[in-house]
Amino acid sequence: MPATGTGPLINETRREQVFPVLDAAEIERLRRFGEVRHYEAGQALWRIGEVGHGLTVVLTGSLAISQPEAGQRRLIATHSPGEFLGEIAQLSGRPALVDVDALEPVEALIIPPEKLRAVLVAEAELGERIMRALILRRMGLLELGTGGPVIVGPGHHRDVLRLGGFLSRNAHPHLSLDPETDPEARALVERFGLNPGELPIILCPDGRLLRNPSEDELARCLGMVGALDPDRVYDVAVVGAGPAGLATAVYAASEGLSVLVLDCRTFGGQAGASMRIENYLGFPTGITGMALMARAYTQAQKFGAEMAMPDEVVSLESGGAAEGDPYVLTLLNQERVRARSVVIATGARYRRLEVADLEQFEGSCVHYWASPLEGKLCTGQEVALVGAGNSAGQATVYLAARVAKVWLLVRGRDLGASMSRYLVQRIEGLANVEILTQAEIAALEGQPGQLEAVRWRLASGEEVCRPIRHLFLFIGASPNTQWLDPTQVALDPKGFVLTGSDVAPGRRSLETSLDGVFAVGDVRSGSVKRVAAAVGEGAQVVAALHAFLAKNTVLARARGETPQPVSAVSARSDKSAQF
């Protein structure tokens, strides 16, 4: 959504970094990566929703970057010789978020997405300037809330929140309009003859209208995810795009392996829901989980990892009888992906509270993370939060700065038993946070989609009822392994994936009961549930991947077969990921 603050925008405060000008020598260094094209005055280079050509460096002439707005065109910027067009979508070949037209005859150097990634690696200093500009331009579009779809529906509606949250967590610009308060939105509803029960609707940049779509339908309308090639065999398919999955993608892709990352929702996992991580190495002042994960997501693409989100994997099976045959991942939409090795990084899914009618309030009044979207909904109100881990502590601190009061309900006797000391001390110093130990939610009161009160029970048996409209649940998570066949992939009694010596003596570190299938991060039995630990396992597993892929190449040759080329396989079985 657009920024709500009144301060200057990134395009103004960091203009030299957002729109750098390349000198003649720098342009010469880029020529080997692209080709020169010519455009006539008035010619469109591309339109919103079309797949962009990649990075476009202006050699002669000038270009206009604009977006439609209220039936007119709003000029965002013009580019002259030495400047370049593009934002972070150009790394992955996703659809453009702006229109580009030649103001006069133009000669431009076009660098396609695959060559752009080569630029970022081969030309370190110049690549850093280009990468920074691409990221800042996306941030500028997010600030303005333009270039993406328009969500029309009541601001408190659960599906408006669901779709807005999905786009926000995918760092995709969008605008939300409430027909109850916005005359333009009301006019749109009247124009299409919609009744309130049909909302929300989505107006996509290409003009298509979607009626309360699923996240997959919306993503495909926006070109965020496309069809996968069923004939391609990847070196590794990573299932899950949290810290462990993204770390695997970064290190595997940077070492030359072909990598596909799949996630049923978006990148970041549970770490992306944290509004401030202060105990992650290298960030003494803290960093939001989404900012940290967005950097990893972009970094993985820089090295050539492909992303498919949202694309949900529903099964894993061997693709053939011979050892070394590719594995086959079947997706919810019945697409199939083949890969020589698989890394399971699906993490965990949020536990739900065992209380009557919970589902009536989920998505609108009951929340499983605390982001700016949820913070805006409950500004100035009283809220209740259940949980005693670090995620609950970070959410409490974040919400306390925005709401009138936070009731923190803890089932145990001592908050410090499961929460880091620095968070406990910070919470204890917040005047508008009241900690209730040995307390449990007893009931939720209200109408479907509209919570009116929360009732909880204290250790004494006394019940307290407060007029609370928003409840936050941080009560742990269960392993996200329901898509795995437990007869093939061994699980522990709690459903976490067994690896290494827990499967059998001498088993490769992080390898499951299936050869070439590995598990990392929170989904793995015995893992340390910390972001840094997940990142470490994601890096560590790359060494095991190299050893497995090298072994299979040798086996294929021993059988007299011509092995399919692996993008990069180390001759050393002990190759370690380079930090």
Image (cartoon, helix red, strand yellow):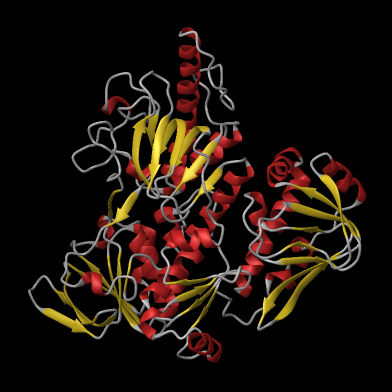
Q: Nearer the viewer, residue 176 or 272?
A: 176
Residue at (35% x, 20% y) in the render: 321
Residue 513 image point, x, y percent: 30, 27
Residue 399 image point, x, y percent: 40, 73
Against 166, residue 576 (above or below) is above
Residue 78 image point, x, y percent: 82, 69
Q: Looking at the image, can residue 59 be seen?
A: yes
Against 27, residue 177 (above or below) is below
Which corner quadrant of the image does residue 380 belong to? bottom left
The answer to whether residue 444 is left or right of residue 556 is left
Q: Nearer the viewer, residue 15 or 319?
A: 319
Q: Locate the C terminus and report the quarter of the image it occupies.
A: top right
Which corner quadrant of the image does residue 567 belong to? top right
The answer to whether residue 248 is left or right of residue 486 is right
Q: Nearer the viewer, residue 297 or 227?
A: 227
Q: Locate the N terminus and report the quarter of the image it occupies.
A: bottom right
The answer to whether residue 328 is left or right of residue 493 is right
Task: Looking at this view, name the residue that lies furthest to the left.
Answer: 461
Residue at (50% x, 45% y) in the render: 246
Q: Looking at the image, can residue 286 be seen?
A: no
The answer to whether residue 138 is left or right of residue 573 is right
Residue 95 image point, x, y percent: 63, 58
Which corner quadrant of the image does residue 526 belong to? top left
Against 151, residue 555 (above or below) is above
